[in-house]
Every structure is written in C-alpha cells, then in structure tokens.
Amino acid sequence: MSVQVPATLSEETVEEISAARDEPEWLLEQRLAALAALDELDLPDVIQTPGRRWTDLESLDFESLVDPDNQSDTTERSDVEGATVLSFEQAIDDHEELLKEHFGSIVDPERNYLTALSAALFTTGTVVYVPEGVDAADVTIRAEMNSRSLFSHTLVITEQSASATILESIESGDETDGDRYFSNTVEVVAGENSYVQYGSLQNLDEDTYHVTRKHAETDTYATADWIEGNIGSRLTRSDVETTLAGEASESKIVGAFFGHEDQHLDVNARVWHENENTTADLVTRGVLDDVARSVYEGVQDVGEDAWNTNSYQRENTLMLSDESEADASPKLIINNHDTEASHSATVGQVDQEDMLYMTSRSIDPNTARNMLVEGFFVPVFEEIDVEEFRDDLSELIIARLD
Amino acid sequence: MSSNEELQETNTEARFAFKKEEASAFKSEKGLDEETIRVISEDKDEPDWMLERRLRALKQFQEMPMPTDWPEAPDLSEIDVDEIVPYIRPDIDTRGGVDDWTDLPDDIKDTFDKLGIPEAEKNALSGVGAQYESEIVYQNMQEQWEEKGVVFCDMDKAVQEHEDLVKEYFMTKAVPPSDNKFAALHGAIWSGGSFVYVPEDTTVEMPIQAYFRMNSEGMGQFEHTLIIAEESSEVHYIEGCSAPKYSEFNLHCGGVEVFVKENAHVQYSTVQNWSKSTYNLNTKRAIAEQDGRMEWISGSMGSKATMLYPSTILKGRGASDNHITIAFAGEGQDIDTGAKVYHNAPETKSTVESKSISKDGGRTNYRGLVHIADGAENSSTAVECDALMFDNESTSDTMPYMEINESKVDVAHEATVGKIGDEDIFYLQNRGLDDDDAKQMIVSGFIEPLTEELPIEYAVELNRLVELEMEGSLG
C-alpha cells in the first residue's frame, strides 16, 4: 500500500530547496529521483500480530505535517582539529567529490517512503570527515528545530585508521502551533580499521513525530558503534542499523529510552553479518511510565558467507506503570552454521527484593525506585564515549523521574 | 515374525513410505465449491447446523487472503485448493470405524500394522483411533474407561451422538473459522478426527492415541479433534501422522480444540511425519480455565512446509501452559513452528521450550507470540529456543513476539543458535564412536526434553525418525 504524496510537494519545491543551497546538478537529480519514487514506496514495515499493529504510521498526516518551504533550525557544531565538521550545505562547497561518492550510498533514499521524503526535502545536516589516522574525539552537533517540519541528513566518513566519537543532540526550539515532524537520516562510512561511535540524543517536545534511520557500513577491521537515546517526541520510529561488510569488523548498537504519558517509542536495532569473523552486540534498555508504549525489534541477520560470527542481543524493559505496554521481538536469521548467536529479552517491574533492601535501609520508596531506575541504565552509560552525552542523558532521566 | 518384531526390525523408512492402491467408496471431485460441501455433508448425513457452519466457513475462506504478509513465511504458492481432493471415504462398511481390528479391510489393516498401531494399543494405550484418508476406520477404547463415562470416538460420529456438546464447542470458542484462511478451509471441509470427553474427577491413566494416514495422491486431510476435559480430570492424547511421498502435493489442514476446565490437565502430543510433499497447515488451540493445565508436545519431522503454532488461552486464574516443540528440517523442508500464549488472567504461567535442527538446506523457524493482558498480574512466562545447524546451506530463524500490557509480570525470552560442537564430537570419537554416531548421539541428547515426555514406543519411534533423517548425509 503506497502512501498519499502531499499536495504541497512538487518538483518546484525540491528545485527551490536545491537552488537556495546552490547545489550541484547531481544532488538535485538525486532529490528529484527520490521525490519521483514516493508514489511507489511504502512506509517502513511495522510488526503485526493477530489483530494488532504495533505502531500506527498510516495515520501520520503528511499533508499537514510536511511544510518543505519553511524549514528552520539552529545547529551548533564543534571544531575538531584535523577533522572536518561542517553543515551539509557548507560541505558541498568544500568537499563535493566526497559527498558525491557517499551520499545515499549507505541509506538508499528509495528504501521506503520516509527515507525518500527525507532525501528529497532535507535542508540541514552535518558532514563529519576524518582523514586517515586522525582521532576526532568529542565531536558535538547540537540542533534545535524551529519549524513545523525539518529534514536532516548527516554523513560521517572515517578514513583508514581514523576515529571519531560524536554526540548529536536534537531538541525543539521556537514554539510553533500544532504537530511537528522531524526526520533524521544518518549515514556512516567506516573505513578500514577505523572507529566511529555515533551517539544521538533526542529530546523533542511531545507534539513532534520523530522518524530516524541511521545506517553504518564497516570496512575490514572497522568498528561502528551506535548509542541511540530517545526521551522526547510524541511518536518515535527509530531504525538503527549496521552492515558488517568488512572482514573482522564489529558493531554495537546500544539503545536507551524512557517513555512517559502517552508517548509511543518504536525502536529497532538491526545488524547484517556479511563477512567472516564479524561481531555484533545489541543492547537496549528502556523504561516506561504512565500509558507510554514501547515497540522493539532487534534483528541479527547472519549471511551465508559470514563464517565464525559472534552475535549477541539483549533487550530489557522496565515497566513503572500498570497502564504502559511493552512489545518486543528479538529476531535471529541465521544462514551460516559457524555462528555463535544468542538473544534475550525481559520485561518486568522494578525488582521487589531490591526495593525491600533499600527501603529497609530507610530510603524512602520513591527515592529507592528512582535510584534503581538510574541503575538500570548503567549498562548504557558504560558504553558512551562522549562525557557530555553521558551527563545529558543522565540529567534527562533524572528529570523525568522527578 | 510377530508384528512386534516387525515394528522393531523393519526399516522405518519403508514403514512410512509404502503406498497402497487407491480404493475408495466415495471420492469427491477436485476443488472446492458450495456443491462439494453439500455433497460431503449429505454423505455424512449431518444436521443442518453443521452444513450451515461449513458453508459460512467456505465463504470466509474465499474472502480471506493468503498469509503472504508474514515475514519470511514458507512459500505456499504451490497450494492450489482447486487441485485438492478434499474428501475420500475409504471402502468400509461401518461408519465411525470398526472396533475390532480384524474387521478392517486387508489393505487398510496392513497399512496400520506396518505403522505399528495395534501393537502400541495392546501395550500402552487406553484407546486408539485410526484415520485413513478422510474417515476414521478403526476406533476402540478399553472398557474400563467407557464405564467411567469417557468418550473417545470419531468426530463424525460425535456430531450424531453428542450433538449438543459438539454444537456448543465446535469451532465456536477456540478456533473460529475466521482465525485464519486455513482454519476457514478446515471449517468448510473437515472430516474425521477424534472427539474426546473426560468427565469430572476422572483420570485416564494411559494415553489415548489417534493415527492419521493419507494414502492417495493429491488429497487433503482435514480432521478435527475436539477434547473436553471436565473439572479435575486428566488425559493424555497422542496423534501420529504419516503419508507416502508423491510428486503431487498433499495438504493437511487439521483443527484441534482443547477445553481444559477448572483444575483439569490435558497433554497433547504430536509426532508429525508427513511425507515431504505435504503442506502441513494446522490450527491448534486450547482454552484453560482456573488452575487448568495444558501441555503441548510437538515433534515436527515431516512435511514440505509446516506452519503450526499451537496456542493456549489462559483464561482462568492460576492456569498454566507448557510447550515443548522440536523441529527437524532436512533437504527441501521449511518447518515454521512455535507457540502462542495469551495470559488473560492473573497468576498464569507459561513456558516454551523449542529445539530445532536444520540440515542439508532445510529451514527451521521459531515463530511465537506471548501476550500478557492488562490485569494479568503476577503472571510469568519463559521462552527458550535452541537451534542446531549442521551446515552452511541450512537456515535457522527465531522470531518471537512479546506483547506485555501488565507491569507485575516476569517475562523472559532467550534463544541461542550454534553448530554442533567440534569438541563434543571429538570427545565422543575418542571414546570409539565414529563421526556419524557421535552426531546422532548429540542430536538425540538435544531432543531429549521431548522424548522423555512421550511413552516409550513413541520415543523410540521419534529417535528412529531422527536417525533416519541423519542417515548417510553426514560427512
């Protein structure tokens, strides 16, 4: 079933966006191709069980949500010695060949309706380019969304033996009336023996629909790690993925979410093992309060050529309220028998014995519960390289608990 | 040679693979329309309400789409319902089956003798039913159980003799035809199967068994099993299935409904060895009342493609459900199986233990759903899936789904996939076993949780089937 293409969209809209940024012909063509493909494309797959659809993307009213001409954001990017951290627009001037080579190479704009919409309409985003052998630590990108809709496209390229640790934070800026839509595409090209950790912390206001697709591809010996934090938004649909294309490459996909009120958080972590000796570790921890609902899908796909694969997945959800709902589906798709793979998932409330232990030491129940919830996220904190990210995430969790 | 020796000694493969000439008293036309159903219903002399249910199910079947939107679902495109012969009545005189083995026509008797049915009856069972094509041909139950009011009979006979019960329970509460396309197909053209009724406070100490055999090429078997276990009763039902291999596909599309009343306990065991040209699309469901206990034990060895997810609705407080499922997929097989549990009441418990083995390009998939409803507090569920892969041509998938609407619960899911451990094989080889024997031994150990739940005859049978699957193809 394809989706109605909003009437506000036309080739002229896309041409105007492209012309305003003085973009080269090839990029305009890619945008137009994505626009043309919308007619034929479907929304991303949503898990269905008898009588139930885990996330309702069909009711997203793109007609009113998408306002391509008035996109606005305020984004601050840190400078890092030896590496390039530029707005996408600026990067086109400075590194056109690099962008031409990699744009759309990792996240196919025509993968689904949402990626195509983003590729056609994006007006902001960042390019992080780390040349051979350079270590770019603590790259920070702080974005505020100031319009009804905003489409962002970010590209990270680490050359051989380079490394980058990145924090991207997304918040709502100026107040606007009504519902909003934020779309975030991130592509990571991890060169041979390079290391990337891309951390993303989303704390949009709760009138915003948030859609993100992040995908990394690893070369030989490369490591691409993701930290995906979702605190804000009314509805989030997040797909964080790695293709382990190079031999002996690795990926960790670490997720943290904390939903409250009527938030709906649909988070997905997927890894494709395509080569020998690759390793993946998927760790997601989530907390739900009030009537919030979480949906989790984790996929470990081991291809026929992926000899000697190690692949692990853990997902744990803590329910603070009886009215919340946690849905989970960890999947294994194994096509090579030389594999050690496992996954586990749990759902439950705060451990009653732990509570008893703490309250019997005269900690009041509320404080005890909050400490246990903070502790629940420790496995995520431990993975974070950028200290600022750890502090921000911790603050947001504490703020939500109060 | 006594038939017992024959059971022990004859080649298991030969015992399942033999074919009989088709000999039937009544065979419906291929395909499916209202007329076919009217003819079947008339041939069975059914009451009007049953014909109406069949026709309604047919309509639902025609309106429902094939389940093509399932991720990684087995390929069912070969199934053309218009090519299926839905109903074959074997040439027997007594409707509902004879109760003396010697009264069976020779060719049918020979079939079940080869499968070891009468021997098993003597040794370990409370009752036996045998279905050949679309009808039960033999049905017998030990007198001591009949005296206690236990009913074990052909489903068609139950429609006549226990009409009120059948009318109340038949595809109304557990498996309505609207459940899925193949449940609807089943509702339209079901034939044969077993009806089991166990009165209050009655424990049927030895298992009851039904054996299903498809002999004709291109036929479909659609037997319906309805088990009602009244308060504080207990019964173990075993079904076995087989068919010879034909070039044309066969379709098995059974329906099983189990009602576990307060404090009752039902165990339902299946050893499925359909031929590798059979599509096995079953719908099995139990409803467990307060403190009731349901157990599903399934071994899926045969079939070309299986889609089977025995499910239990835990409706009463304190009800529990256990699944043990073993799937073995060899060359050309796609065994997509699992479990479904709905926790709809407080203090309900479920466990699922799934073991799968894939080799020579076969595919296994565990597809399961655990749903915990709001209010089902203090419920717990534990799902454990282990998969063993023999080679790089095979596929092993695991797709569990969890829907948790209640916070005071304990939900855990675990799965592992791996190859046969080189160290384990090395260890066994050091003790004088050759490579093949070592692998067989490891597999036997791997499926032990299933075999230990079965009567010894079935356990032996299952082990032999596994050996057969592994024979000669190990290197």
Image: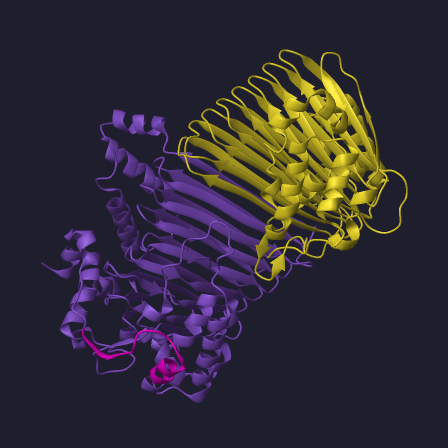
Chain colours: A yellow, B purple
Q: Nearer the viewer, residue B327 or B463?
A: B327
Work out which residue is located at the far left of the displayed protein and give it.
B1
Q: Is residue A218 left or right of residue A397?
A: left
The magenta segment is: B23-41
Residue B116 drawn above or below residue A181 = below
Q: Nearer the viewer, residue A170 or B2?
A: A170
Residue at image coords 63%, 50% = A43
Q: Quadrant of the C terminus of chain B?
A: top left
Q: How many marks?
A: 0
Q: Please provide percent x and percent y for residue A104.
A: 62, 34
Q: Please provide percent x and percent y for residue A87.
A: 77, 26
Q: Please provide percent x and percent y for residue B420.
A: 36, 33
Residue B114 drawn above or below residue A117 = below
Residue B242 drawn above or below residue B366 = below
Q: State yes or no: residue A362 in magenta.
A: no
User: In this rendering, does residue B72 appear at all?
Assistant: yes
Q: State yes or no: residue B31 in magenta.
A: yes
Q: Quadrant of the N terminus of chain B?
A: bottom left
Residue at image coords 21%, 61% = B116
Q: Is residue A329 left or right of residue A211?
A: left
User: Could you say which quadrant of the image residue A352 lies in?
Assistant: top right
Q: Nearer the viewer, residue A306 or A260?
A: A306
Residue B124 drawn above or below residue B169 = above
Q: Please provide percent x and percent y for residue A185.
A: 68, 36
User: Could you say which quadrant of the image residue B305 lies in?
Assistant: bottom left
Residue at image coords 52%, 70% = B178
Q: Is residue A235 left or right of residue B94?
A: right
User: In this rendering, does residue A123 appear at all?
Assistant: no
